[in-house]
Amino acid sequence: MNIVNLKKAATDFPIQHALADRWSPYGFEDRPVAEADLCSLFEAARWAASSYNEQPWNYIVATKENAKEFDQLLSCLVEANQAWASGR
């Protein structure tokens, strides 16, 4: 059995398998993402194509290792998103 089958979305109505099988390997794990992985992710995003090649990217990152910054960023989210983003 592969991990995709374990993480399949419980949809209310039938949807494309590619959507129901989609999942994030980091998004819902209760473990930190390595700083090197974060740097690679944001470097790739920085070089991603954009409309008219203007690269209007801005990112704010806070990890749980710095609780004050993490809580400050978490407070910017709506309550429903705070629940999953906090991992609490």
Image (cartoon, grey):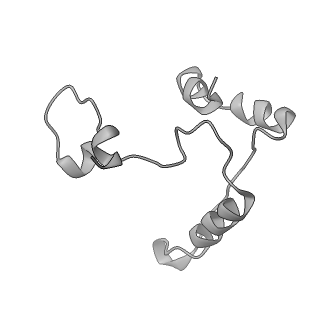
Residue 41 sits in quarter: bottom right
Residue at image coords 71%, 27%: 75
Position of 10 compared to 87: left or right? Answer: left
Q: Is residue 38 above or below residue 32?
A: below
Q: Position of residue 44 (x, y in %)?
A: 58, 71
Q: Is residue 56 among what the camera can see?
A: no
Q: Position of residue 73 (x, y in %)?
A: 74, 36
Quarter of the picture containing the C terminus is top right
Indicate the position of residue 27 as horizontal and vertical percent values: 53, 43
Report the front residue among 51 and 45.
45
- Tell which of 42 and 87 is nearer to you: 87
* Residue 82 vertical position relative to residue 2 in the rendered view, above or below: above
Residue at the spot 77% in from the left edge and 30% down from the top edge? 71
Residue placed at 53% from the left, 22% from the top? 80
Horizontally, is 18 left or right of 26 in the view? Answer: left
Using the rendered image of the protein, determine whether residue 32 is visible from the camera's viewpoint: yes
Q: Residue furthest left?
A: 14
x, y percentage for residue 11?
23, 30
Looking at the image, which is closer to me, 64 or 73?
A: 64
Is residue 40 toward the left or the right of residue 2 in the image? right
Number of numbered discs on residues: 0
- In the displayed structure, 31 sits above or below 11; it is below
